[in-house]
């Protein structure tokens, strides 16, 4: 049996949980006008490195890929 904190939780009564969620959402909505959007200077140079463990070689191969992003959302599709 594992007693790791990753596998533990405190359970609160439904009403207490609902009230805490409601108050948190209310505070977030009140603060929204004070929040400034995060912007990035374009273009963005991206670099990804990973080990190719699929090859038949006993030693893993380091793969490096680079890209230039004109839209920050494109980073999510970088493969």
Image (cartoon, helix red, strand yellow):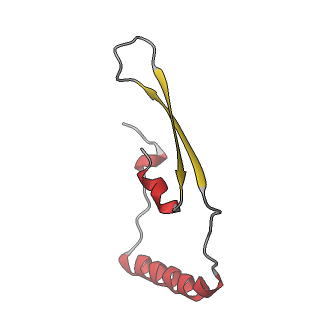
Q: Position of residue 2 (x, y in %)?
A: 40, 38
Q: Is residue 44 above or below residue 33?
A: above
Q: Position of residue 47 (x, y in %)?
A: 56, 42
Of all residues, the one furthest to the top in this rendering is 58
Q: Position of residue 71 (x, y in %)?
A: 51, 62
31 and 36: which is toward the camera: 36
Q: Position of residue 55 (x, y in %)?
A: 36, 19
Give the left or right position of residue 38, taking residue 11 as reference. Answer: right
Identify the residue at horizontal 60%, vertical 49% (top origin): 45
19 and 73: which is toward the camera: 73
Number of numbered tags placed on the structure image: 0
Identify the residue at horizontal 44%, vertical 79% (top origin): 16
Identify the residue at horizontal 41%, vertical 52% (top origin): 77
Quarter of the figure that contains the C terminus: top left
Q: Is residue 9 above or below residue 54?
A: below
Identify the residue at horizontal 45%, vertical 78% (top origin): 21
Give the left or right position of residue 59, taking residue 14 as reference. Answer: right
Q: Is residue 40 above or below residue 33?
A: above
């Amino acid at each position: 049996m594992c007693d790791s904190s990753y596998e533990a939780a405190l359970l609160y009564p439904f009403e207490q949980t609902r009230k805490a969620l409601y108050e948190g959402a209310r505070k977030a909505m009140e603060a929204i006008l004070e929040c400034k959007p995060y912007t990035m200077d374009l273009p963005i140079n991206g670099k990804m490195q990973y080990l190719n463990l699929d090859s038949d070689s006993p030693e893993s191969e380091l793969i490096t890929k680079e890209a230039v992003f004109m839209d920050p959302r494109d980073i999510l599709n970088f493969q």
